[in-house]
Image (cartoon, grey):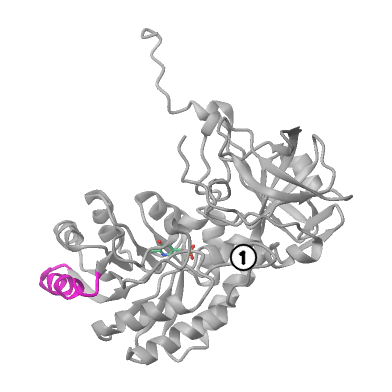
Amino acid sequence: MTVPPKTATPSTAASPAAVATHLPLSATLEADVMTIAGCSVAELVDRFGSPLQIVDVTDIDARAHGYLEALAALDRPARAVFATKAFPIIAVVARLGRLGIGADVTTAGELALARRAKIAPDRILYHGNARSEDELREAAEQGVGLVVIDGPQDVDHLDAVATRPVDVLVRITPGIAPATHESMATAHHGQKFGVTIAEAPAVFRAIDAAPSLRLRGIHVHVGSQITALEPFVDAITRVGALGSFEVLDAGGGLGVPQHPAMAAPATAHYIHALDDAMRTAGFDPATELIVEPGRSLVARAVVTVYRVRTVKTSAGRTFVAVDGGTSDDVEAVSGLRAASPFALTSGVTSPVTLVGLHCDSGDVLARDVAFGVVAPGSLVVMPGTGAYTFSLANNYNCATRPSVVAVEAGEARVLVRRETVDELFARQVIDPGSD
Ligand SMILES: Cc1ncc(COP(=O)(O)O)c(C=O)c1O
């Protein structure tokens, strides 16, 4: 398996107070005992096995309310749709839906996820730079609220298959330099998404000429894990040059603290900054603001818990190997997230390299992380794994993907059960005569 090149991962020694900003809101951590929503992490692992993803669902509720309240406080229409790619779990999408948050989808699979979560079609927003004819047809047939046009061909393709009028936005690439990891920056020129400000008017004209399409507005998405407000403001200022529209979709991308030294803007400040930027850029007071949060809604609500399998010192370095790795946390091993794991142990700390079980020397979850004494069987907690961890999990080395368990008011319930070895081979067609 190929993973993106590794970049420096700022790993940090974690103490109870230091990790608090990126632990789930209902977590407690005293020495080597951790609870989430009143459930003992150690008992959860004994019961459900490891690796285990534990979801503090009231943390997600609190983040959702943060968005809903900030949006309701604006003088313009405003709403949020959850970027389902961040944590595509039906129960989570449904819970957000009941709170009033719609769904942003990119494939037929994510559309099915949103529908199974009972998100009404008009609260679904459909992205994609390479949707199939079937996907576009289905979007139209299901009455998806907004389809985002990524380029001139989308206009022709969607208009050709639309069986009813479809409201569309055009994705604009405003030409903003990456303010995050290169793989997560999506608003600079020379990457695959959207059309430039100069190219946009031709696409608007094509939409106006397409009998089935109605241009409702524009979309811009700066990237992911953006921890400063300037890129968001800059993007809105730039796309304001195109004039005002019924809808401005400002995308997602608000970052979260991933280790104690990292700060991120509060949701209310972020929403306020978007609204301010819209006013300054000349958008009409009646222009609806849509935001598409993923990471900032779910990242901090989830931890992954591993069990240590082996501890080895070689060439002066101590390697602590756990029962997961590349197969369940691609963001950590590829340096896309500043991983800050800690062990549920006490005692004098010393730096270790936290590795997984996979056959690849890039299978490193964190370097130079300060752990107390750990031994086979010790528990290691990886905080902040609610976004792009479940969705990027894979079967490298035929690993079975972990369970996801929700905890709330002292109770635990399985949202996704652990994959079985039989499921690993369920799609393989075994022809008895061919071997
Ligand atoms: C178009 C679009 N909207 C929203 C998001 C969600 O971003 P984030 O999870 O950083 O909030 C993404 C993911 O990068 C995206 O591509």
**How many numbered marks have been drawn onto this rendered protein structure?**
1
189 and 121: which one is in front? 189
The single residue placed furthest to the right in the displayed view is 347
Pinpoint residue 276: horizontal percent, then vertical percent. 44, 89
Pinpoint residue 51: horizontal percent, then vertical percent. 67, 41
Residue type of the residue flagged with mark 1:
Ile
In the figure, 96 relative to 363: above or below?
below
Residue pictured at 43% horizontal, 76% vertical: 232
The quarter of the picture where residue 284 lies is: bottom left
Residue 287 magenta-highlighted? no
Q: Quadrant of ligand 1?
A: bottom left
Residue pictured at 51% horizontal, 72% vertical: 100
Label 1 beta carbon less than 8 Å to ligand 1: no
Quadrant of the frame with the C terminus: top left
Q: How many neighbours does mark 1 have within 10 angstroms: few (below 14), some (14-19), or many (20 or more)?
A: many
**Horizontal side, residue 139 vs residue 413: left or right:** left
Residue 200 magenta-highlighted? yes
Task: Specify the segment rendered in magenta.
Answer: 196-212
Determine the secondary structure under disc 1. helix
Read off the residue under disc 1.
60
In the figure, 186 relative to 348: above or below?
below
The quarter of the picture where residue 255 lies is: bottom right
The quarter of the picture where residue 29 lies is: bottom right
Pinpoint residue 259: horizontal percent, then vertical percent. 67, 62
Pinpoint residue 2: horizontal percent, then vertical percent. 45, 38
Residue pictured at 26% horizontal, 84% vertical: 241
263 and 413: which one is in front? 263
In the figure, 123 relative to 425: above or below?
below
The single residue placed furthest to the left in the displayed view is 209
216 and 274: which one is in front? 274
